[in-house]
Amino acid sequence: MPYDPKLFARRRADIAERMRAHGGGVMLLPAAEEKARNADNDYVFRQDSDYFYVTGFEEPQGAALLFADPAPGKPAFLMFVRPRDRDKEIWTGKRAGVEGAKAVYGADDAFPLPEMEGKLLELLDHPGPLWYRVGCGAEWDARVARILNTLRSRVRTGARAPDAIVDPGRVLHEMRLVKGPAELDRLRRAVEITAEAHLAAMRDGRPGAREYQVQSEIEYAFRRRGGAGPGYGTIVAAGANSTVLHYRAGDAVLHEGDVCLVDAGGEYRYYTADVTRTFPVSGTFTPAQRLLYDLCLSANLLGIEEVRPGATMDGIHDKVVRHLAEGLVRLGLLEGNAEERIADGSIKRYYMHRTGHWLGMDVHDVGAYYLDGKSRPLVPGMVLTVEPGIYVAADEAKAPPEMRGVGIRIEDDVLVTEDGCENLTWMIPKEPADLEAACAR
Ligand SMILES: [Mn+2]
């Protein structure tokens, strides 16, 4: 899907309207900066999600300004961008420059970076709040503080320093939480790519393979289909590594009789999938692994079943926790009664994380989870993960030896629809028979 200037123009009109409902003012959004990895070598650049959401612009450095109520004839959307520079462009590629910012990206006005601070001083002399997210970068925080102090020192000559700083997330993150059709198209592409990657992992995650080899198959699948790469650090966890929640693919060998937990999602044009599957390295679970797997799978299916407009994250989590606790009591991993084991926290020996999170441009996507202190009701267009897990630590004395060092998580990406939900990642095998077929060599 190519860059669509109308989509971003509509978004900015929507943002301005929402800003007006919160006192108007001006929004300042810094672009991401390139970050040094080592010596004169940078990390792969990725634009800031908020900045991309508003501008569609993928070059580093600079900022965008949005005015909720521009005076007649004054610009509503301005950009500060790297200037065209023939010498630098030979080394690092073509830049849009101020001309491109206006002609392609729809800026009403644009300035080269060297003029940014001076122009901001002029432009932020404006009534209403300043929408700026404090704390995301020391350099930007210092720059904003400098500008505010200068404006405050000029109040006697009529300057208007903003009298409130508001987090742009109040508007942007609420918008990003509910996905539009163009966003869902991208998310679906991310899911397709991710499905291929998980199938490759199941195919190649055989006895004797190393975690990094499985990782390379996964990331190859992301990239060869035009994805940007992984949307977060790929987890390939063999054997007892599966019980470490944020383990990254290392160099451990996959052994016959072990499970392999893969938590990997491809990013496609700024939208990422987030999927976990756990499969038997031999192709068939041991009886003990199968008991744990079936419990986790039933919790995953139950959680997805609960996703519909009006349901809440807390409600879904509570149902999943109760289901897991009952199952763990039945399996003898917890003693006594499920309700008590939830109340005294001992369920957390095996299930210590939340059942889901918002998903979108960021893997743990933005948007409030609670409104007025209450878990917010789901509405159509939200995308969340449902990801119950059971983790039996390698040294868990209460568990039978054949269950120790087994971690299982099953994670799907679920879209809330008008009448329920759609599991976007339905095609990635998770029923034991389908897993066995996918693992067959
Ligand atoms: Mn997740």
Image: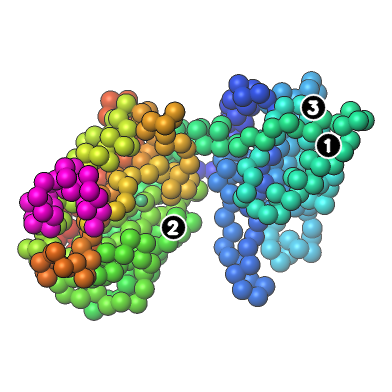
Whether residue 77 is situated above or below residue 118 in the rendered picture = above
Q: Is residue 389 visible?
A: no
Mark 3 against mark 2, which lies toward the viewer? 2
> Which residue is label 3 attached to?
74
Task: Give the percent coordinates (x, y) of residue 88.
Answer: 76, 63
Front: mark 3 or 1: 1
Instruction: Using the numbered discs, state the Cα–Cα distance from disc 3 to disc 2 in whole angstroms.
Output: 41 Å
Tell me, for residue 152, which label it has, or none.
1
Instruction: Identify which residue is drawn at 16% across, 68% down.
Output: 397
Q: Residue type at mark 3: give it.
A: Lys
Q: As shown in the figure, which amino acid type bears the numbered disc 1?
A: Arg
Task: Give residue 4's position: percent from left, percent from top.
Answer: 57, 37
| Residue 204 drawn above or below residue 9 | below
Q: What residue sits right under mark 2 in the picture?
A: 232
- In this rendering, position of residue 310 left or right of residue 190: left
By secondary structure, the bulk of the magenta-drawn segment is best described as: helix
From the viewer's side, name the closer residue of 42 and 102. Answer: 42
Residue 325 in the magenta stretch? The answer is yes
Q: Is residue 144 located in the magenta-colored stretch of the structure?
A: no
Residue 122, percent across and down?
84, 37
First reached walking from the N terminus: tag 3 or tag 1: 3
Q: Residue at x 25, y 50 (%)?
A: 345
Image quarter (top left, top right, bottom left or bottom right) of the C terminus? bottom left
Marks 3 & 1, CB-CB < 8 Å contact = no
Label 2 sits on what residue type?
Tyr
User: Residue 428: x percent and y percent?
Assistant: 25, 51
Secondary element type, mark 2? loop
Image position of 228 (left or right of 387): right
Between discs 3 and 2, the one toward the N terminus: 3
Q: Within the image, what quadrant is residue 286 found in?
A: bottom left
**Alpha-carbon neighbours of circle 2 within 10 Å: few (<14), some, or many (≥20)?**
some
The region drawn magenta spans 322-349
